[in-house]
Image (spheres, grey):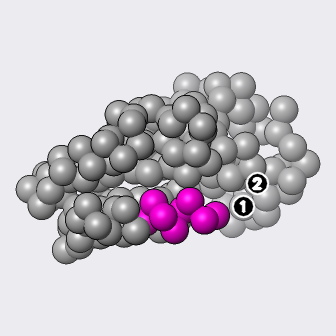
Amino acid sequence: MLSPQITTLIDKELTKYPADQRQSAVMAALRFVQDEKGWIAPEDMADIAVYIGMPQMAVYEVATFYHMYNLKPMGRHTLTVCTNLSCQLCGSDDTVAHLHKRLGIGLGEVTADGKYGLREGECMGACVDAPILNIDNKQLRGRLTGEKIDQILAELDKQ
């Protein structure tokens, strides 16, 4: 069941669209759920579908298409490494390897303490700064080296 806080946010979002285009608010609705809960469960997708009046499968299609939605708990901090061609050519494999070594997890996994989740993402639109790391779907960091990654992790450890 969607919380009153989420339904209030969705209602505000719905005012931006014509009444017959309620489905246009689906991405925002998914974000609101994830911001509140940290991830989006199938039940949440079903609740969103009912609330905005669209098929459950359509909500699921949106949630699984975009890499910014967590469909399982991904830790307190979700680290998403762009592995698209530009980032790969600029060292995203090294970035993933360094994070694997530092955190002891692979792509799609969460550290035992629940602090970090590591994901693979598609183009983040910042190829000039490749390789790119997206932190909690809020911050992009680029031109990564092992030293920069260690600095990022040290900053996150303080939070």
Magenta residues span 152-159
Q: Which mark is residue 13?
A: 1
The residue carrying mark 2 is 10
Queried whether the magenta region covers residue 157, the answer comes back as yes
Residue at the image point whose x is 91% and y is 48% from the top: 4
- The location of residue 114, given as percent across then percent down, is 60, 38
Give the amino acid at mark 2.
Answer: Ile
Question: Is the residue marked by circle 1 packed among few (<14), some (14-19), or many (20+) residues within 10 Å?
Answer: some
- The location of residue 34, given as percent across then percent down, is 66, 46
Outermost residue, left direction?
89
Question: Is the residue marked by circle 2 packed among few (<14), some (14-19), or many (20+) residues within 10 Å?
Answer: many
- Describe residue 108's horizontal placement relative to residue 8 as left or right: left
Q: CA distance from mark 2 to mark 1?
A: 5 Å
Give the amino acid at mark 1.
Answer: Glu
- In the image, 86 versus 95, the foreground residue is 95
Count of picture labels? 2
- In the image, 82 versus 105, the foreground residue is 105
